[in-house]
Amino acid sequence: MKIYIDLLLFLNFAFDFILLLTVSIILKRRTPLKRIFLGSILGSLTILVLFIPFNTLMLFITKILLSIVIVSVTYGTKSINYILTNMLYFLLTSIILGGFMYYLSVEFSSTTDMSISYLFILLSSPIILYIYTKGMKKYKLKTTTFYNVDIYLKNKILKLTGFMDTGNTLLDPYKKRKVIITKNKEIKEYINENNFFLVPYESVSTHGLLKCIKVDKIYIESLGLKRNIVIGFTEDFKIDADCILNYLLMEE
């Protein structure tokens, strides 16, 4: 079987460039393209390791070490944790792209013109990595800004989904208690059935008065139990969550 070294080097360079660019986007590294280009050149040369008679264990260790070198050259060496995070995402993205390439290579195994197969795989790789990047961003957004919230009322516990909004730092003007805003209908009924008080609020698009009531306690996933919290009801937000958490809770 003929092996075209120049073709292997070019393909490896192209895939490494796509991988490093994808990791840079996911982790928001703001890496100059020339650094990514340099890392891709270094990554393309690592294909030559395959021609060294290593056993499986040595080949695995060598690939890990080379990955550390590639991400260090591309993204820098701020700290050990920084390097390991870059390497982890680089390897995970490589696995995803590698699996995609394997699937396409099997699908095109009967194709006589292998150059067309390689070209198709090369052109398709950015698409699958784009989908992967969008999915990762959406996952990171959900895991860093959405929380499970349990609100303890007198006779029940409401389990809601809360969104941590940096714009909500509302305090009630009476006792400076943090205000959580909700559109939950049960909270609305609970407020109307009890002695509520009004808290003025103002946002970019509107202002007004919130009907509020103090609840016994609330539990926020990852943040713990919180007391002395005020719950206010409004229908004037369109975030895909049951309530908007107060950002001042993050500072405690």
Image (cartoon, rainbow, N blue to C red):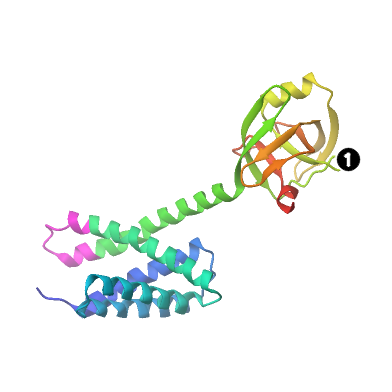
Q: Residue at x 70, y 51 (%)?
A: 250
What range is drawn magenta here?
A: 104-118
Q: Residue at x 32, y 77 (%)?
A: 44
Q: For mark 1, what is the residue?
A: 175
Q: Residue at x 48, y 66 (%)?
A: 85
Q: Quadrant of residue 3?
A: bottom left
Residue 207 point in image, percent of width and height: 81, 39
Residue 125 is left or right of residue 144, and the answer is left
Quadrant location of the N terminus in the rendered image: bottom left
Residue 184 point in image, percent of width and height: 66, 28
Q: Nearer the viewer, residue 236 or 99?
A: 99
Q: Quadrant of residue 175?
A: top right
| Residue placed furthest toward the top | 193
| Vertical position of residue 197 compared to residue 65: above or below | above
- The amino acid at mark 1 is Lys
| Residue 117 falls inside the magenta stretch | yes
| Residue placed furthest toward the left | 1
Residue 23 is left or right of residue 8, and the answer is right
| Residue 84 falls inside the magenta stretch | no
Mark 1, residues whose alpha carbon is within 10 Å: few (<14), some, or many (≥20)?
few
Residue 229 point in image, percent of width and height: 77, 38
Q: Quadrant of residue 78?
A: bottom right
Residue 7 point in image, percent of width and height: 23, 75
Residue 183 is left or right of residue 116, and the answer is right
| Vertical position of residue 115 compared to residue 171: above or below | below
Residue 206 is left or right of residue 44, and the answer is right
Q: Nearer the viewer, residue 182 or 130?
A: 182
Secondary structure at badge 1 equals loop
